Structures are given as C-alpha cells and as structure tokens.
Amino acid sequence: MVRTVRRQKSVRFPRAACPGARTRPIIMGYFDQITAVLPVAAYATDGDGYISSYNAEAARLWGQEHPMGSRRWFGAWRMRASGGEILPSDASPLAVAFKEGRETCHSEVILERPDGHRTCIRVHIRLEIDAGIVIGSLVLLIEQPSDAKEDVRRDQLAAIVASSEDVIVSKTLEGVVTSWNAGASRILGYTAEEMIGQPITRIIPEELLNEETEILEKVRRGERVEHFVTERLTKDGRRVILSITVSPLKDRAGNIIGASKVARDVTERKHASDMQRRLFDELDHRVKNTLATVLAFAGLSRRRAVSDPDSFAESFAGRIQALARTHNLLVQGKMLGSDLACLVSKEINHGAPDEGRATIAGANITVDARTAGQLGLVLHELASNARRYGALSSRGGSLCVEWTTDENTGGLVLEWTEAGVSGVSAPIDTGFGLSLIKSTTESLGGALHLHFNPDGLTCRISLPGLEPAKLEAVLPPPRSDHAE
C-alpha cells in the first residue's frame, strides 16, 4: 500500500516521489544502532506520523510493544496532559508539531501504561523536513525526576479513585469527559470507553441542562460546587438522585483546565426521607383523629358513666384498646394500610381465643389507614357483643366473617354471621355500641344492615370505593360445621 505525505497546504505527494525518500532505510539503520544503546526512550515515525521504529526503553515506558506502522503519533496506552486530562491522539505533541511544522523540546505530558502506572515526561521532537515537506520525525521521551513521596501519594489517590463506590469523573471546561471510574460505571451503567471523549450532557436530563452551564461557569471562576442534589440518567434510561461536588482542576502553573466531579448515589436515602416525611404526616393525622374519637367516646358515654360507672370504664377501656390494636397494625404496614384478614382476626381473638368457633374468609385486601381505624372499632363492638351475648359466649355457637369485593367499583361487602345461640332475647347492645357501629359505617360512606335470627344475627356492612391489593382467595372457605 502506498501512503502519502501531506504539505501544510493539504497538498499530497506519493511517498516514492518525495525527495530523500530513498535515504529513509539508511537513516533508520543508523537510528536502530544509535537508540539501541541510548538510556532514554526514543522512536521514529514516517511522514504520516506512524511509528516506524522504537527502542527497548520506549517499549518499557509504554508498557507494551506494537507492530511497526500500527500506531500513530505515540505508542503509550494513553497520553494525558500535565493536569491529568486525557489527550486525544490528534492533540498529542507530535501531532501538533506535524500540523504546525515546528519542532519542540518543552512539551510535558503524562504517559499511562495499561496497568495504570503513569510517568511524567518531557517530549523532544526533531522533524525531518525535505523541500518543505515533513518526511519523518525523531522523538525522545525524557522521564522527569519525581518525589518518591509524591509518587506514593499519587498512586494511593489513583487507587482510591479506582476502588471508590462513588462516581468520580473529570471533564474539560467544555464539558468533555476525560476520566470515568468504576463507581461511575456501576451507578450510571456506561463504561469508561463509552464515556471518555463524550460530552457529560449525555447523562443529564434535558430539562436540567442549564445546571451544567452554571456549574462550568462557577468552575471557570475557580469556585467549588458543594453537595448539589440533582438527577442524572443511567444508560438504561432510569433516573438516579446524586449529591454532587465539583472542584476546579488546575495544572502546575495554577491554570484552571477542567473540573473534577464526585457524586454519591442518594436515591434510596432520598426515597427513605420522603417516606419518613409521609409517615410523620400520616402519624400526625392519625393521632389527631384518634384523640377526636376518644373525645367522642367520652361525650356519647356520659350518661352511662353516671348510671353504671363500672360498665362504662370497661367498655371505654376496650374501645381505646381496639384503637391501639389497629394502630399497631398500621405501624407494621408503615401507616399505609392494614390487611383486612389481620384486622378481623385481631378483634375476634382479643381477650380469649375463639376455640375454633370462628371462621374468616375473603379476598386479600389492604384497606387504607382511615378505613382500617374506623372498621377496627366496628369489629370490636361486634366481637365484644359476641363474647358477652352471642356466638362466642357458648360452646354451641359459631361465627362466620366473610367479605367480597366488586372489581369494577372497588366496593367491599362484609358479612358478620352468628348462629347457634339459644334464647336470644337482647340481640346486640342497642345503646352506645349500636350507635357507634351505625355512625362509624356512615362516616365511611357505607350502609349497615342488621338482621336478627332466632339463633343469632347477620350484620352486613357495605363500603364503597375501596382499592383491594389483590382479589384472590387466600383464606379457606367458610366451614359448614361448628366446633363443639
């Protein structure tokens, strides 16, 4: 294959037509003999910048070897500017020297090997020019003496960055990514190869692009951005909440050349904080409602307190305890709601086990906090009456509690059926207990239907607009036989 050489005015010449091209093998022969004994790294290129020869010191400095003619401009795995940002190959000192047609001996860069080791060097470039055309170059790489302590500190810092769980990236003042650690890959999904050289705006939601402009303006002024909480996009399109700190990057002369960004994923912490705030709000609401309910109990029970203080004290304490049991269930559900089956079971078995006389069946439903609190009181009144006068007061009694839902409206129908109770003369407490059941059901927008049988009763409570978690039978169907 015939390569071409390029003048500064983009005029191309076939290599064979270049004056002096015939002398290249002779020059290269001397290069190999001379550089083989040099204690510094050296390499030569052809007129297009492709490496045509290099010595053992260069291979050591690069940390790798290459077939002749396979690499252009430099042979290191990666080249960085003195400030640490990655240099694209066409911005390397040799590429700039070819472009501008002038030699240099003061360019300072950092060479990075595949194992991550970095070496600070000075680049000395000698161009071979014939009739105004660059036909080759000789490059010497002089290692800069460094402080051993500084090397250790730099290596330690590099290890910390590489192993950090946080996002640690650097970018130019134009917002182009120059480094990308493993933490950034883990949290944001992009590999270093996918992001280095790309604009940082790739991970910024469109509506937040102005943030990057403001951050870069502050960095240019030498300002530091502290713990800025914002959102960024992952490779798969998810949004993560990050707490970001951005600091200016400076070269040895103190010039600001870019920005270093450290970001911590606070998505879970932010969600937990929001949840905690909602829980506190709900708790505040529940406490106020509970106190209002207690005051209502006291007001409605005033007459009984005078005529029968012992009975009042017992029933009043029972209702307060029912509120407490429901509250415990709500706390277990993080104040979001309560499982209806647990609510029913708690009230039926409170005080004394049902000894197999009670059966509950229905869909798996989670009722909201307000409904759970009100329904818990209704179930408490029904269960208290059953233990005093109804199905749970005699061995021959049976209790069946079942509920159904309407998938279209989300309405709930709960039936409380007692049977096997002989000599029912005073069915359900027609005083405060019945009044409480009626008023509570109505406060939920529901309806109450009571039907008394010769050996028991049926209480049907219809509530509108509930949203069941799942409409699947998770409990056994009602039993037809009764435990004796």
Image: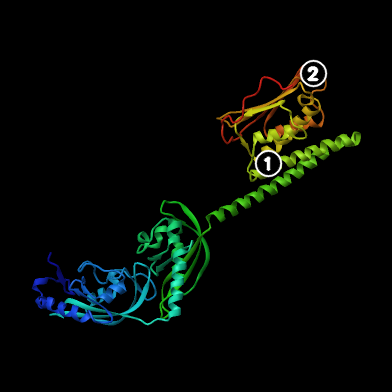
The residue that appears at 82% across and 35% down in the rendered structure is: 315
- The answer to which quarter of the image holds residue 327 is top right
Quarter of the figure with the N terminus: bottom left
Q: Nearer the viewer, residue 149 or 420?
A: 149
Give the side of residue 398 with respect to residue 91, left or right: right
Give the side of residue 199 with respect to residue 306, left or right: left
Q: Earlier in the sequence, mark 1 or mark 2?
A: 1
- In this rendering, is residue 192 above or below 26? above
* Residue 164 appears in the rendering: yes
The residue that appears at 81% across and 28% down in the rendered structure is: 388
- The answer to which quarter of the image holds residue 401 is top right
Question: Which residue extends farthest front?
Answer: 37
Distance CA(mark 1)–CA(mark 2): 35 Å
Question: Callout 2: few (<14), some (14-19), or many (20+) C-alpha neighbours within 10 Å?
Answer: some
Q: Which element type, helix, strand or loop, lies under badge 1?
A: helix
- The answer to which quarter of the image holds residue 295 is top right
Residue type of the residue flagged with mark 1: Leu
Question: Which residue extends farthest right?
Answer: 307
Tell me, for residue 422, which label it has, or none.
Answer: 2
Give the side of residue 221 with respect to residue 273, left or right: left
- In this rendering, is residue 1 above or below 378? below
Q: Count the marks: how many?
A: 2
Give the side of residue 184 with respect to residue 468, left or right: left
Q: Position of residue 131 (x, y in %)?
A: 12, 80
Q: Position of residue 239 (x, y in %)?
A: 47, 53
The residue that appears at 73% across and 32% down in the rendered structure is: 348
Residue type of the residue flagged with mark 2: Ser
What residue would you read off at disc 1? 329
